[in-house]
Image (cartoon, coloured by chain):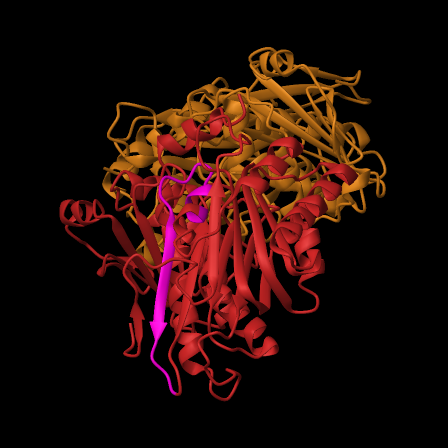
Chain colours: A red, B orange
Amino acid sequence: MDSGVKVIASGTVTSPQGFLAGAVQSGIKNKRELDLAVLYSEEPCVAAGAFTTNAIKAASIVLSRRHLQNRNAQAIVVNSGCANVCTGDSGMADAEEMASLVAGKLGISPGDTLVASTGVIGVSLPMERIRDGIRKITLTREGGHELARAMLTTDTFAKEIAVFVEAKPSGFTIGGVAKGAGMIHPDMATMLCFLTTDAAVDADFLQVALQRAVDASFNMVTVDGDTSPSDTVVLLANGLAQTETINDRNGEAFREALDEACLYLAKCVVRDGEGATKLIEVAVEGALTEAEARLAARTIAGSPLVKAAIHGNDPNWGRIVAALGRSGAEVAETKLNVYLNNVCVMKQGCPVPFDKQKVSASLGDKEVFLRLTLNLGTGRATAWGCDLSEEYVTINSDYTT
Amino acid sequence: MDSGVKVIASGTVTSPQGFLAGAVQSGIKNKRELDLAVLYSEEPCVAAGAFTTNAIKAASIVLSRRHLQNRNAQAIVVNSGCANVCTGDSGMADAEEMASLVAGKLGISPGDTLVASTGVIGVSLPMERIRDGIRKITLTREGGHELARAMLTTDTFAKEIAVFVEAKPSGFTIGGVAKGAGMIHPDMATMLCFLTTDAAVDADFLQVALQRAVDASFNMVTVDGDTSPSDTVVLLANGLAQTETINDRNGEAFREALDEACLYLAKCVVRDGEGATKLIEVAVEGALTEAEARLAARTIAGSPLVKAAIHGNDPNWGRIVAALGRSGAEVAETKLNVYLNNVCVMKQGCPVPFDKQKVSASLGDKEVFLRLTLNLGTGRATAWGCDLSEEYVTINSDYTT
């Protein structure tokens, strides 16, 4: 990490000034777990968002996009256990009611309240429980940790970060939480991620900076190639840190810190992919264009054969090359080099003898690093995926039964 | 099947007149299994082919495409256990030597000999064993069955068919063999499939008819989304059945029989997908275009979440809709209907109550049928996939170790 950006110990989405949160176990989930939460800023916020590209969209996405059109927001209500997707007009009415209930509780406008739902598709929200739950939520400065837990579905740990950025006249904080687990192959955004900052930020700059950060983080991770209809990233900036208004001209430190926070959370999402036992980083260099490098890196990170081989510590690099070949990126076989954990296994299209046992042992680490140099141009990109384990299948064989 | 096209009991690629084959255990594989085979026509053939679109191509593909440029061929040599991919100039020389050795043995031109290799990528062929093996192969009229076994890698059964077509002045036979198992998401063709016929067929017609049959069969099946660098379908026609020359004007029965043979073999490939326990048929109707219907059907058939749910008999139809939504096909949620084994579970974008236990029980069958009606246009397509089991991961975790 660059100097000037410091990770805050036990930081979360309520670490920036003026943000509160709280969660309850409302009974949406069968399990006795937190499943409903509210995030609130004491001051109105400039807001930016990135949402799923899936043609089927959650009611909450439709509503939140509409409420974000004026680039303002002050609260987010989120539930897990039910995605409120494919639920027709009543699903839309339910999302609207959630926004209204929270706005009423907080004394703000429903139009400044965003909604996010994650869980099973095709099931309506149990609105009685949600009404009761929203009433019971208590907001605190430490509530970000509860909110981080209430968002989870098959995730095994909460994903939280906060970073402090030294700046003049005043430093500022960026906080964030995310959830992931399955149906993770974001295209614009991951399942759910909420980011906050007490910096004062120009609205246009905020949206551009968020999109850039998301493109390099959430949009470069994959668990299973399935893009969810609920993918949402929202960033709220309330200005309480008394910074200068951050914009294109003075925004470098903000961008850097935001990139850092998004990348940390995106990697958490992959590490906690359903059944995942390790993180796979795929770096592609020397592609014709950056777009082709991104395509190649994501295709390799998403290949079930590559993922299964790495799960078994099998240095079967042919699968990496085969995935590259089908990615759509331009490839010249005779210029291609491939590295497994920095050991060259293929050079200029030909196999390089290597110590199989040693490389296999290194693939047993919690992080595996694949690098491909295409030697065609200057395009480069990094994607992150996880291994494919028997456990992924087991988790997903009986999700609703 | 339509009248006039009859499946031949125990039919195979040598069922059409004038085709011989044979196989040996040359020692390319560690296991004591057949791994090297030759298919030969006593008469020169008109030939057509469809090959992988993967940018990384097997040496055998490069060679066979070149040898097919004149639309003639008389023999195919095939090995399993080593794909001869990413093996540089020496790999190309090895493929050329295989063609020359077989041509020498049979007294034909190397340019009329095609080569196909399947197995591990990045390993050179053990040419001593191959030279010895080719010498020892004995060709017989029944040899198609041996050849079908010699092509297999992780496949669990041989995939063979022959159909007889009644026609005047003379009926004809089409035979075929295929292998599949893993890295199956063909784009132009599947892993390996050889088809033969004793019909006399016009060369242009043969290529068009093959491409059409492949598009509706092999190009619509998926096991794991990974397109192999070795995918090959070749069709040889030797004319020995004394038919009229079949072309655009009189080719309907030939096309129908070829479609039938390709579809049968493609479904065998899916049924025998690595770890597969059932066949999933996905029919998409009412898409804007046929291309969008194909895209939607293939995306759903390839979704790991859909595949895992069906493995567990879980009627979690939200995943089907989510996969449709990310496919790129135009979707209007409020017009969409979804059926699981002919039970409507979603109508016009809203969930339809259904007997979960009954539908779950029906998903336990060896064949599962998903149908989506988009109600936007007349595009329709069917794709075939298999379920995703823990066994798929186990098979692919230690393929080379």
- The answer to whether residue B371 is above or below residue B47 is above
Give the image location of residue A190, x and y in percent: 51, 53
Note whether residue A151 is visible.
no
Number of marks: 0
Left or right of residue B365: residue A9: left
Residue interval drawn in magenta: A147-168
Note whether residue A213 is visible.
yes
Give the image location of residue A46, x and y in percent: 59, 71
A163 in magenta: yes
Left or right of residue A365: residue A20: right
Residue B83, quarter of picture: top left
Residue under the point 45% across and 52% down: A178
The foreground one among A367 and A348 is: A367
Residue B283, quarter of picture: top right
- The answer to whether residue B289 is above or below residue A297 is above
The foreground one among B316 and B121 is: B316
A57 in magenta: no
Q: Quadrant of the N terminus of chain A?
A: bottom left
Residue under the point 38% across and 67% down: A260
Give the image location of residue B303, x and y in percent: 55, 38
Residue B340, quarter of picture: top right
Residue under the point 35% across and 41% down: A276
Left or right of residue A206: residue B203: right
Give the image location of residue B38, x and y in percent: 43, 32
- The answer to whether residue B70 is above or below residue A90 is below
The foreground one among A313 and A153 is: A153
- The answer to whether residue B314 is above or below residue A82 is above
The foreground one among A388 and B383 is: A388
